[in-house]
Amino acid sequence: MALDFSDDRKMSRQAMKAELLDAETELQLARAWRDHRDEQALHRLITAYMRLAISMASKFRRYGAPMNDLIQEAGLGLMKAADKFDPERGVRFSTYAVWWIRASIQDYVMRNWSMVRTGSTSSQKTLFFNLRRVQAKFEREAMARGETLDPHQLREMVSREVGVPLHDVEMMEGRLSGSDFSLNALQSSDDDGREWIDTLEDDSLQGGDVVEQAHDMAQLRDWLMAAMNGLSERERFIVRERKLREEPRTLESLGEELGLSKERIRQVEAAAFQKMRRSLETQSREVFHFLA
């Protein structure tokens, strides 16, 4: 079953024309989908309640998301509700679907509010959608009493009202205080102004560091090759397969290939590492992590 969310106005008009289901018809459709995966029954059930999904989506317009996207997320929440709905519980589908629709829309809004994750816990999610409303309520009440609330006092009141830690209120205030800005934006209105990205520190290696690192790596490779050359052919093969492959071989697979037991492969590997350690002790301890 597929629903077309490409035009929110068209979808709204279609939803308003959809049939209104009575309780008995709704129950039959829900059972047909649950018991027989009847897609026609599912489509009829979803279509009948798209007006509910669109109505709920419209309440989240103030968060700046395109209405078409909000309707799409509401529709996805409606379909999740239909898939999990138990018609034998004696609850109308619309009552059950409201939670799934709202959760789907809220998750979408929070994912797209900022490139920085806005919140993941239930308290952060509650704050994201209620912080401004609760703050405004306390400020109106204080104004009616002729009082002025300082920021810290207001945050403490919000914390108690919503039932979340104070540090969560402080964190969410900061995240909601501004929107994302491009690092390519100019610092000033002048044409020759620098971009913000030009003020970031360059963490990449400088020329001298690159040369020094390349020299050290070459030396390490020489030491390792010398240690490897002191091994027998079988020991070199096992070390290469166990430590130098992008996806290391298991003891079992090597044992099958060489006709040895898993324990014997482990013993040969351990003996090879001991030989390499003795060879490397006279060179450098910097390569010992390779044998860990």
Image (cartoon, grey):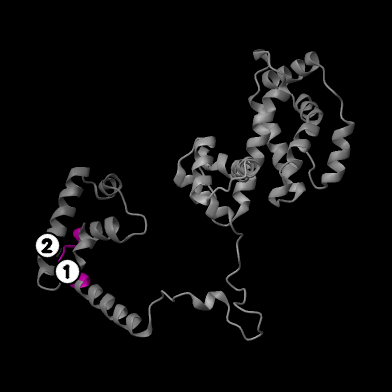
Q: Quadrant of the N terminus?
A: top right
- Under circle 2, the secondary element is helix
| Magenta stretch: includes residue 108 | no
| Identity of the residue drawn at 90% across and 32% down | 17
Q: Is residue 165 left or right of residue 192?
A: left
Question: Which circle marks residue 31 in the picture?
Answer: none
The residue to which callout 1 is attached is: 227
Q: Main secondary structure of the magenta part?
A: helix
Do the numbered discs 2 and 1 sit on residues whose CB atoms are within 8 Å?
yes
- Under circle 1, the secondary element is helix
Q: Nearer the viewer, residue 187 or 120?
A: 187
Q: Nearer the viewer, residue 122 or 46?
A: 122
Magenta highlight range: 224-235
Q: Residue 4 appears at what percent x and percent y?
A: 80, 42
Compared with 57, 93 (above or below) is: above
Does the rendering let one see residue 37? no
- Amino acid at dot 2: Lys
Callout 1 crowding tier (Cα within 10 Å): few <14, some 14–19, many ≥20: many
Question: Which circle marks residue 275 in the picture?
Answer: 2
Q: Is residue 237 left or right of residue 14?
A: left
| Identity of the residue drawn at 70% across and 23% down | 95
